[in-house]
Image (tube, coloured by chain):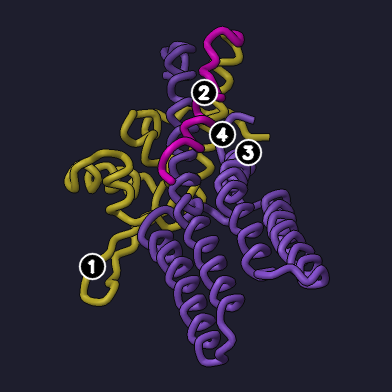
Chain colours: A yellow, B purple
Amino acid sequence: MIAPKFDELIHAPTRLSLVSLLAAAEWEDFRFLRDTAGLSDSALSKQLTTLEGAGYIEIRKGFVGKRPRTSARLTHVGRAAFDQHVAALQEIVAKAGASVLPSTAQVQEGAVDGGQ
Amino acid sequence: MSDQVRPDEAARALTEIDRRQAQIIRAASLPRWFWAAIGFLLVAFAVIVDATHGALVQVVAAVVFMAGALAAVGSVAYRSVRGAQPRTNLVGPRVMAADLAFTAVIVGVSLAASFTLTASGVSYAATIGASTTAAILVVGGPMYTRYRQGLMLANRSGGRR
């Protein structure tokens, strides 16, 4: 059972998107995160630095051949904070009743359409 | 702060979380062209086996088939390394069981078709058998990919259950 705990740092829209992506992934490439989240290099760097400062993510810099490659992943602390934040959001929605539940079917459709 | 978050805002945030996690799963799934490519290679190889009797030609066809299959798998693997790498815990026992079942269906149908056609003395048995397998791959592959995505979505962290 995860204790709900709202996390303001994660809840900011851009960081919510990034942490959500990282929560489903292992190490994720900087370019993939940038392109998927639709951010500029500098905007993504800023958000990743903020998350790293909070201990939520770990950043790895290396080389593939001669090309520099930056990757990020959630730390245990970050994953726990994310799970608690999701639980807090679910609690807010649950208290309000089912009327505000977004369509899960829409999300699932989004997962299976296109991209093939 | 959580008291200041409206339920509809929380619901939108949950949708965004689901959407982003689905993006990772979708990006790491086998593309539609992969199934068609493997199906095409299978049929092409079978046609050469049926239509020619020269050992050299058949060996070359086997090499080309293997090279093509490796290129397709390599392309998917390269895309995976450069792109999304889903957490291993998204692939739970149900996904592994589904993978095995899908593979068993393909192999089972292929072997059954090949043995039946060969035993019946049908001409172009290999081509017909491979075409059957290719049809399953082209039609069933993308369908299975969608089913697998659904199973992985159910395993993700922080998603609604």
Q: Amino acid at mark 2?
A: Leu
Q: Residue at x 54, y 81 (%)?
A: B62
Image quadrant where residue B158 sits = top right
Helix, strand or loop for disc 2:
helix
Q: Residue B122's spot in the image, x, y percent? A: 74, 68
Helix, strand or loop for disc 4:
loop
Q: Which mark lies nearer to you, 4 or 2?
A: 4
Q: Are marks 2 and 3 on the same chain?
A: no
* Front residue of this view, candidates A35 and B116: B116
Helix, strand or loop for disc 3:
helix
Residue underneath mark 2 = A89
Q: Rounded to the nearest whole Å, what is the CA distance between mark 4 and mark 2?
A: 11 Å
Image marks 1 and 4: residues in contact by CB distance under 8 Å: no
Q: Residue A111's spot in the image, x, y percent? A: 49, 37
Image marks 3 and 4: residues in contact by CB distance under 8 Å: yes
Q: Which mark is residue B159?
A: 4
Q: Which residues are magenta?
A: A97-116
* Front residue of this view, candidates B102 and B152: B102
Q: Residue B138's spot in the image, x, y percent? A: 55, 51
Q: Amino acid at mark 1?
A: Pro
Q: Which mark lies nearer to you, 3 or 4?
A: 3
Mark 2 closeness class: few <14, some 14–19, many ≥20 residues within 10 Å = many
